[in-house]
Amino acid sequence: MRLRRITELSAEGVSLEALLNSMRRLLRQGSMEKSIAVAGSRVVEGHDDYWALRRLGCSLAPVSEGAREEGPVPLDALGFYDNVKAPELRVYRDVVELLTADRPTPLVMIKGDWGKGVRVWAKLEWYNPLSLSIKDRTAFSVLSEALAGGQGAKAVYEVSSSNTGVALAALSAAMGLRARIYVPTTAEGFGPAMLKILGAEVVTRGSSTVEALPSAMKEAEVDGAIMPNQFTNIANPLVHVAATAKEIEAQANFLGLKLRGVAASMGTGGHAAGISFYFKNRRPDVRVIGVQPAEGSHIPGIRRQDLSKWWPFPERPDVIVDVTEEEAMETAISVARSNGLLFGVSGGAALAGLLKISGVEEGDYIVVVPDHGIKYLERYLAELERSVSSP
Ligand code: PLP
């Protein structure tokens, strides 16, 4: 048995079920039981394990010529954490490398009165370089997947309220593709403005992303454009398994945290689903807290979830908490005034949701903060006025 770079090998595709089962096994065991059998650089047996290693972000695969050999080989020896470690001096040859290799995003402890022995840490996703949000990860993942499938496509169409669209428009600019983004009438000013500056075509359609989706898909088909569709594309949650969740675990391990829970707000549900998949299999003692807007509340980037339309795997948050727009903004403003960091509204919601759950035990909790509050200044100013006039 020897180790080979995973990208030097080729393998046949496998079903989603086989892939997810193999990923679960690897996450639970933390090792490969057997090598992958190869003939030269072609995988002949263990296709599911090959794809699972790739999807988990491993850089190496244990291989043996002709037949599989008994292991075990620990994931650590297969470069499991390599994809979440930046090169020492953070120097990159292009924007795609910056986006994919400048990992992990920072984790910072947030001061506050959270209860005896409870510590809260924020994972700052505005450190992603394109949309200054967590959606850079999703956009790169779904676009790469769509490009691999769409022979020679020159244009990308997508429906997005702002951040995914901006990340896709930026990637399109970097890759020489034409981007058309369908934005709902409710989109924040930041989204449409950034899209125009990046040279994307902006089509305002419908009052929600869901409403615009069917007609946008039809138009993409007619025009021969690729449509990654972040709402159903499995590459969306899977990038959060391979990177976002793994970074959280690696950072928690590095700090020696007593990790109790991770809180995530939900739009497509992509990062909450990826984090759930990772932790339910690798660290089932860690609770995942999903946060959605309360009935009638509008929080940019997130929406109420219909769990019957969850991602095609059962791993999901242990608890789903409703948060109002006011609670999200009050929490964000309070953190800004005590810590000097202004979370975006969905990040405020994620923290507000965590603080609402029962059974918070002594230990560490991580809140995913999808973007920065500078995109929502008008909302925050309106909230300050509202709270002054109705204390
Ligand atoms: N917060 C913001 C600001 C977003 O833009 C989004 C998604 O667009 C989310 C949260 C939700 O992320 P996800 O789609 O992974 O559920």
Image (tube, grey):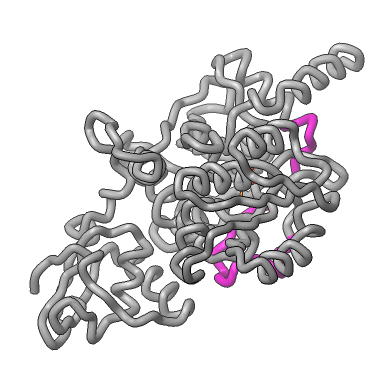
How many marks do you count on the picture? 0
Image quadrant assignment for residue 265: top right
Q: Position of residue 65 (x, y in %)?
A: 10, 82
Indicate left or right for 295 with 118 as reference: right
Q: Position of residue 380 (x, y in %)?
A: 75, 22
Name the one closer to the observer, 216 or 36. Answer: 216
Image quadrant assignment for residue 97: top left
Name the one closer to the observer, 238 or 6. Answer: 6
Name the one closer to the observer, 337 or 127. Answer: 127
Q: Is residue 314 magenta?
A: yes
Residue 156 shows in this picture: yes
The quarter in which the C terminus is drawn is top right
Image quadrant of ligand 1 equals: top right
In the rendered image of this protein, does residue 213 appear above or below residue 182?
below
Q: Residue at x 24, y 29 (%)?
A: 89
Q: Is residue 380 magenta?
A: no
Q: Residue at x 40, y 69 (%)?
A: 24
Q: In the image, which residues are magenta? A: 306-328
Residue located farthest toward the right when viewing the structure as drawn: 389
In the rendered image of this protein, does residue 231 appear above or below residue 263?
below
The quarter in which the N terminus is drawn is bottom left
Q: Position of residue 71 (x, y in %)?
A: 15, 74
Image quadrant assignment for residue 56: bottom left
Indicate left or right for 37 with 52 as reference: left
Residue 118 shows in this picture: no
Indicate left or right for 268 with 36 as reference: right
Q: Residue at x 44, y 72 (%)?
A: 20
Name the one closer to the observer, 293 or 90. Answer: 90
Q: Residue at x 47, y 36 (%)?
A: 128
